[in-house]
Image: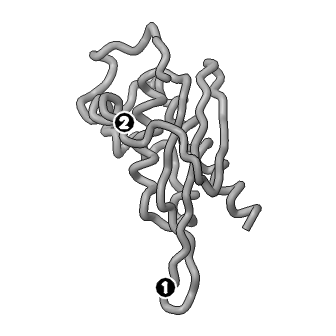
Amino acid sequence: MERECHICTPQTYNKEVLKYLKNPKNMGAMKDADAIAEDVSFCGDSMKMYVKIEKKKIKGKEKAFVKDVKFETTGCGGAVATAEAISEFAKGKPVKEVKKVSAGKIIKILRGLPEQKVHCCEMSVRTLQKALASWENEN
């Protein structure tokens, strides 16, 4: 559940961030996740991400793709928006590509993020990358 933040007001975020924040489609748990990871930011926000992986044969080689991503957070609006943005970015992409995504890339997708909320994006990226690393270590 999103928590209150004295910095978060409707004026804090641009229209693109608000789009992800107001209607998160990927918020919630995933019962059949292939990987789960958690992270905590220095501000005390926490995040948990669930990832479903799909393997496909392409030109005779098996490749892993992110099929689905869900998240839960105790964070503020910045955590919700960035987790939603990275979840949407990751779906359908090869695991190798998603593992390389940076907070900067997600901030570009969001068309900017207030400086005091960049750590939210970094937590979202870290959490997803931890989940993918966990999956790779098990497979």
Q: Looking at the figure, which quarter contains the C terminus? A: bottom right
> Looking at the image, do the residues carrying marks 1 and 2 touch, with CB atoms under 8 Å apart?
no
Percent x, y for residue 67? 48, 61
The kind of residue tagged 1 is Ile
The kind of residue tagged 2 is Pro
Q: Of all residues shown, which one is farthest toward the top?
A: 6
On screen, residue 5 versus residue 40, left or right, reads: left
Which residue is label 2 attached to? 24
What colouring does the structure picture have? one colour
Q: Of all residues shown, which one is farthest toward the front?
A: 31
Percent x, y for residue 47? 59, 33
Work out whether 11 lies above or below 102. Answer: above
Which residue is label 1 attached to? 58
Q: Quadrant of residue 41?
A: top right
Q: Residues within 10 Å of mark 2 (few under 14, many from 20)?
A: some
Q: Residue at x 49, y 50 (%)?
A: 69
**Helix, strand or loop at mark 2:** loop
Disc 1 versus disc 2: nearer the observer: 2
Q: Residue at x 30, y 28 (%)?
A: 22
